[in-house]
Amino acid sequence: MSESTQVVSFKLGPEEYGVDIAQVQEINRMVAVTKVPRAPVFMEGVINLRGQLIPIIDLRTRFGMPRAEHTKNTRIVVTEIGTKRVGMVVDSVSEVLRLPLDAIEPAPDMITGVDTEYIRGVGKIDDRLIILLDLAKIVTGSEKRELETTDIETAA
């Protein structure tokens, strides 16, 4: 049996993405997001998750895609980026997949408008291609500091 990794797959527009299941803390339905003054453009705001304020990133905006109306399928994938819990808004969550490591290829130079700096590789399973994201690179160092220093207290 070959080595494999488990990924949570989700959709943004027509494309399917995946993140390592170890980085996903929970998946929640879309809730009201409180806007935060002077927040980075891709940050929708914050939510109160069981007493903890969590910044919410719109992955569509982050990847330069047009914003989409939230639907009953829209989800917030709560992850940990560095030491910070962050929620990522996705169009829908598909499933948890076991992906053989030999089915993962390095990212090609250009993938449907998403900067390859965010991409760990592309997984192939059956007739599907799943773009595997590197969460550590979704938010850059200066943006991490911005998320940490954004005046979240005023939103509470």
Image (cartoon, rainbow, N blue to C red):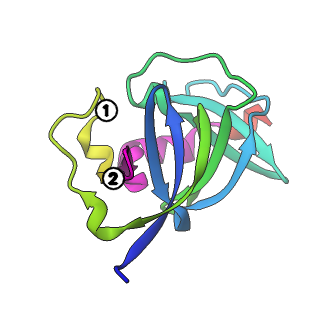
Residue type (three-letter) at the residue carrying disc 2:
Lys
Query: How packed is label 1: few (under 14 Cα within 10 Å), some, or many (20 or more)?
Result: some
Q: In the structure shown, which secondary structural element does the residue marked by tag 2 occupy?
A: strand
Marks 2, 1: nearer the viewer? 2
Quadrant (top left/top right/bottom left/bottom right) for the C terminus: top right
Q: Is residue 122 above or below residue 34?
A: below
User: Which of the 4 image quarters holds residue 123?
Assistant: bottom left
Q: Is residue 68 above or below residue 149?
A: above
Residue for badge 1 = 114
Lateral position of residue 53 relative to residue 105, left or right:
right
Kindly state the secondary structure of the residue where label 1 is placed.
loop
Q: Is residue 66 visible?
A: yes
Determine whether label 2 and label 1 are within 8 Å by CB.
Answer: no
Residue occupying image coordinates x 79% and y 33%: 31
The residue type indicated by label 1 comes to Val
**Residue 124 percent location from the top left of the image:** 33, 53
On screen, residue 49 versus residue 137, left or right, reads: right
What residue is disc 2 on? 124
Q: Is residue 131 magenta?
A: yes
**Residue closer to the observer: 133 or 146:** 133
The span picked out in magenta is 123-151
**Residue found at the very far left of the displayed protein:** 109
Residue 25 in the image, given as x and y percentages of width and height: 65, 61
Q: Give me the residue at 58% from left, 55% from top.
A: 79
Whether the magenta-drawn stretch holds residue 79 is answered as: no
